[in-house]
Image: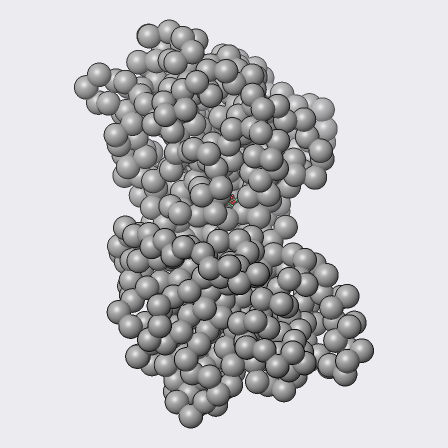
């Protein structure tokens, strides 16, 4: 989704801004632009449709001077991706330039009012309305740029993070946030602005997270100032971010997605470190232990999430119901927030989000808190909006995930959910010692099992060539692996653009069986569990209709080998952790098919890494 970068200091702004834009490319975008105020005070704005590389090419012969500037990658919401709709947007007089992430919901009303006052618009964006509103207020009220931004934002309904600069003013950037991420990086005599601190990590690891409703006054040679729209000053709270640049680079892999798939043995180690004791086998999530009483009286747990995080939550439902015997509901955050849900003060709402910035999940968190529920976050990005908005939580600690298709975050989320279930189950006394130790031991063995699974890569790469040109896939699984089937199908459609559906295997007979023929491959998760025999029968039904089967199996499973056309054999772990093992070959299958088709694996069309608008 859209990305913001800004700089003010003693260096040339352009190279810093362009590097920042490259670092934000993973978020997904369709155009890019930059605005600089040069040393004479001229405001130069350059923008174009396409990638940051296209912008770099476009500005080659332009004036790129100036030690203050703002830059943006746009993911289209209002208006098609083109040069005119790209940010920055300038006011009618071309005195003010603005970049904006988010959506101004009442832009039509504001635009009508501005048009009535003689304003004209070049683009079809909501953002151009805001920059003109700022200019209108600034000129009619003869106020400062800060005051004009504050007054304009009071009229805005919607979500935003913005940055504004002005012709003739090389000393000041005004930025503001509501429901869309924004951080100020603090350097030595310089400031950086970004929607993601990771994009600025080579310059500083000191960050101030701008809060909702705050406006940042970022002035050359002055301390950073944060004020509300009513001009009340807020405290500056500088946080340190521990991250290395190598975590943001491909490290020799052709794609971030492949790197992230291969990182999984290590990310599971990082995820369980300090939580699963290798000597005693004890498992503890401090976010639960510190709120023990709250968890002990939980009547119900509600997971809220989107996309892959929602799939992980479905596995969380099985884990918690099996291990803790607490009823669980899993909700799409986007539906939950708008359907007047029943939330009791004794409920625990678990918000699951890799980015910690998903707008719908954040809104669901706010709703749950208002209803008095205790909100627990499972996030990856440290300091993200959701992690800050929750009462307690557990980071998954898998490091930055840059590929748009989530891989290591999914396995990290399921790992945290297993630890969550074990911690609560032990406190409640609903889990036997034997089972507790079986699962905790399996968690410790997971990294080695995943290393073994990754050895299947060459086989899966060969297999992918057979199915690259299929138009439809169906993925079947049951129990813990029904969500794994959903996730496998999502991976394939996201990056290869092949239509794929996940189904509980037994549901196939109730409709999707009509689709089965020689043209449509069926991926069946047929690892041992208590529904194994039923799944084998479902496979027979597919074969009887001429379908072709790729089966994920465990051991030398001769029975399935006789039915399936192709088998991928994975190591066995305890049933509740099988989704972690099984998801890896499904990630690799999707990856290789997408590569065979020549797709942009890391930045698939239309997708954004963090969905910060509804
Ligand atoms: C996963 O591959 C997707 N890119 C997408 O479904 C994602 O999981 C979803 O947008 C939720 O994101 P979050 O985990 O950052 O909240």
- Is 153 placed above or below 93 here? above
Image point 57% across, 61% down: which residue?
Answer: 230
Left or right: 470 with respect to 198? right
Q: Position of residue 542 (x, y in %)?
A: 61, 26
At 49% from the left edge and 61% from the top edge, which residue is drawn? 227
- The answer to whether residue 291 is visible is yes
Task: Name which residue lies at 32% across and 34% down.
Answer: 271
Q: Position of residue 506 (x, y in %)?
A: 62, 20
472 or 432, which is in the foreground? 432
- The residue under the point 45% across, 89% down is 41
Q: Nearer the viewer, residue 192 or 448?
A: 192
Q: Could you say where residue 64 lies in the image, as x and y percent from the top left?
A: 41, 86
Residue 534 figure quarter: top right
In the rendering, at what x and y percent does residue 59 appear?
A: 45, 84
Judging depth in this view, the residue of 327 and 311 nearest the camera is: 327
- The answer to whether residue 481 of the structure is visible from this angle is no
Give the image quarter of residue 505.
top right
Outermost residue toward the front in this view: 232
* Front-most of residues 519 and 9: 9
**In the rendered image of this protein, does residue 372 appear above or below residue 532?**
below
């Amino acid at each position: 989704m859209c990305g913001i970068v800004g700089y003010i200091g003693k260096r040339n702004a352009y190279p810093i801004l362009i590097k920042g834009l490259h670092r934000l490319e993973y978020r997904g975008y369709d155009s890019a632009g930059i605005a600089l105020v040069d040393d004479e005070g001229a405001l130069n704005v350059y923008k174009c449709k396409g990638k940051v590389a296209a912008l770099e090419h476009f500005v080659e012969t332009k004036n790129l001077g100036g030690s203050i500037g703002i830059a943006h990658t746009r993911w289209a919401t209002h208006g098609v991706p083109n040069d005119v709709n790209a940010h920055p947007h300038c006011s009618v007089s071309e005195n003010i330039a603005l970049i904006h992430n988010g959506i101004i919901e009442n832009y039509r009303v504001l635009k009508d009012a501005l048009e009535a006052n003689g304003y004209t618009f070049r683009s079809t964006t909501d953002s151009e309305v805001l920059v003109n509103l700022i200019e209108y207020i600034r000129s009619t009220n003869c106020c400062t740029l800060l005051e004009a931004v504050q007054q304009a934002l009071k009229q805005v309904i919607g979500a935003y993070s913005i940055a504004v600069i002005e012709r003739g003013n090389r000393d000041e950037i005004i930025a503001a946030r509501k429901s869309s991420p924004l951080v100020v990086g603090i350097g030595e005599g310089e400031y950086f602005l970004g929607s993601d601190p990771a994009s600025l990590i080579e310059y500083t690891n000191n960050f101030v997270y701008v809060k909702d409703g705050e406006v940042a006054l970022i002035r050359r040679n002055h301390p950073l100032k944060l004020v509300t729209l009513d001009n009340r000053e807020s405290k500056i709270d500088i946080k340190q971010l521990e991250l290395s640049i190598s975590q943001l680079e491909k490290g020799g892999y052709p794609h971030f997605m492949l790197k992230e798939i291969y990182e999984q043995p290590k990310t599971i180690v990082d995820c369980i470190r300090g939580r699963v004791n290798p000597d005693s086998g004890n498992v503890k999530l401090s976010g639960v232990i510190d709120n023990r009483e709250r968890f002990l009286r939980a009547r119900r747990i509600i997971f809220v999430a989107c996309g892959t995080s929602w799939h992980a939550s479905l596995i969380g439902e099985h884990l918690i119901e099996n291990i803790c015997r607490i009823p669980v509901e899993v909700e799409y955050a986007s539906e939950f927030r708008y359907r007047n849900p029943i939330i009791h003060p004794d409920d625990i709402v678990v918000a699951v989000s890799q980015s910690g910035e998903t707008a719908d999940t954040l809104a669901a968190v706010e709703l749950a808190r208002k209803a008095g529920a205790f909100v627990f976050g499972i996030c990856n990005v440290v300091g993200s909006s959701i992690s800050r908005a929750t009462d307690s939580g557990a980071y998954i600690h898998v490091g930055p995930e840059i590929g748009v298709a989530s891989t290591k975050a999914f396995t990290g989320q399921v790992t945290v959910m297993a630890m969550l279930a074990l911690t609560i189950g032990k406190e409640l006394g609903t889990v036997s010692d034997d089972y507790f130790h079986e699962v905790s031991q399996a968690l410790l063995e997971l990294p080695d099992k995943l290393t073994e699974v990754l050895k299947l890569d060459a086989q899966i790469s060969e297999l992918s060539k057979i199915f690259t040109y299929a138009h439809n896939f169906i993925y079947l699984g049951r129990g813990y692996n029904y969500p794994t089937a959903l996730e496998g199908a999502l991976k394939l459609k996201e990056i290869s653009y092949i239509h794929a559906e996940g189904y509980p295997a037994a549901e196939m007979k109730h409709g999707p069986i009509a689709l089965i023929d020689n043209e449509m491959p069926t991926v069946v998760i047929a690892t041992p569990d208590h529904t194994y025999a039923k799944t084998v029968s479902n496979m027979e039904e597919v074969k009887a209709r001429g379908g072709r089967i790729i089966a994920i199996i465990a051991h030398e499973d001769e029975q399935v080998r006789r039915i399936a056309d192709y088998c991928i054999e994975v190591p066995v772990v305890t049933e509740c952790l099988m989704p972690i093992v099984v998801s890896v070959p499904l990630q690799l299958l999707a990856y290789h098919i997408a590569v065979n088709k020549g797709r942009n694996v890391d930045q698939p069309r239309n997708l954004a890494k963090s969905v910060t608008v509804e």
